[in-house]
Image (cartoon, helix red, strand yellow):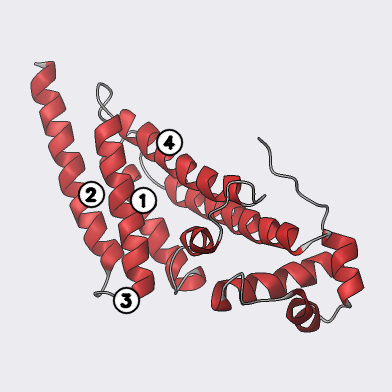
Amino acid sequence: MSTRRITMTPGARRVLSAASRLFYERGIHAVGVDLIASEAGVTKKTLYDRFGSKEQIVVEYLADRDERWRAFLAEHLDRTEPRSVERVLAVFDASQAWTTDNSPKGCSMVKAHAEISDPAHPAYALITGQKEWMLTLFTDLVRDIVPDRPDEPARTLMLLHEGALIAHGLGVFPDPIGHARRQARELLEGAVTDGSRTAR
């Protein structure tokens, strides 16, 4: 199921910019359209004319972050050697850089899911779809270096990655993404070694 998107006018972009900052900092439910309109310097009528509903603003907020993250990640992956452990670890490197600049309080999708648990909400499929995409990405990257059995290592990598993002947002201990990256390297190098033994 595709998620409906709107065409961005300059006024809509101002609304989205204000909403994105407010939703991430304060939470989706805590932020009303009056505050978004005020922060964006537009009337509430303009906001509804552009988006139709607060739900659509939430969709645009999450979709925009997802698109920017995927482009950011692609740049990191493009700088690595294909079919290598380092290429998989580049996902963790990208997350480290991304969280520093964009997500000091943790993953926006995880934060949004804590508030949006109804599958009927138009943003729900976008949230879960983003995490499904990440699992597919890990699976594809692992398959390049462990062709015969990528699923289990990919799921473990996903757990390491997502757990690190949550620990980062909560400030549980220093450098959780770096810790997860080191664990990921051990996992991958072990999987590659096991695969080489099996192939003999």
Please, what secondary structure does the residue beneath circle 3 have? loop
Measured as percent of width and height from the top left, residue 166 is found at: 36, 64
Q: Earlier in the sequence, mark 1 or mark 2?
A: 1
Give the residue pinned by disc 1. 90
The reply to whether the C-beta atoms of the residues labelled 4 and 3 are less than 8 Å apart is no
Look at 23% across and 49% down and name the residue there. 184
Q: In 3D space, how far apart are the residues under numbered discs 3 and 1 (Cα atoms)?
A: 22 Å
Q: In 3D space, how far apart are the residues under numbered discs 2 and 4 (Cα atoms)?
A: 16 Å
Q: Earlier in the sequence, mark 2 or mark 4?
A: 4
As drawn, the label of residue 136 is 4
Please, what secondary structure does the residue beneath circle 1 have? helix
Disc 3 crowd rating (10 Å Cα; few below 14, some 14-19, many 20+) is: some
Disc 2 crowd rating (10 Å Cα; few below 14, some 14-19, many 20+) is: many
The reply to whether the C-beta atoms of the residues labelled 3 and 2 are less than 8 Å apart is no
Measured as percent of width and height from the top left, residue 123 is found at: 63, 52
Q: Earlier in the sequence, mark 3 or mark 1?
A: 1
As drawn, the label of residue 171 is 3
Which mark is nearer the camera, 3 or 2? 3
Judged from this view, the residue extending furthest toward the top is: 200
Look at 36% across and 50% down and name the residue there. 90
Locate residue 79 relative to residue 89 in the image: left or right. right
Give the residue pinned by disc 2. 184
Locate residue 166 relative to residue 195 in the image: left or right. right
Q: Earlier in the sequence, mark 1 or mark 4?
A: 1
Please, what secondary structure does the residue beneath circle 2 have? helix
Q: Amino acid at mark 2?
A: Ala
* Relative to 137, residue 170 above or below: below
Q: Amino acid at mark 1?
A: Ala
Res 33 seen here: yes
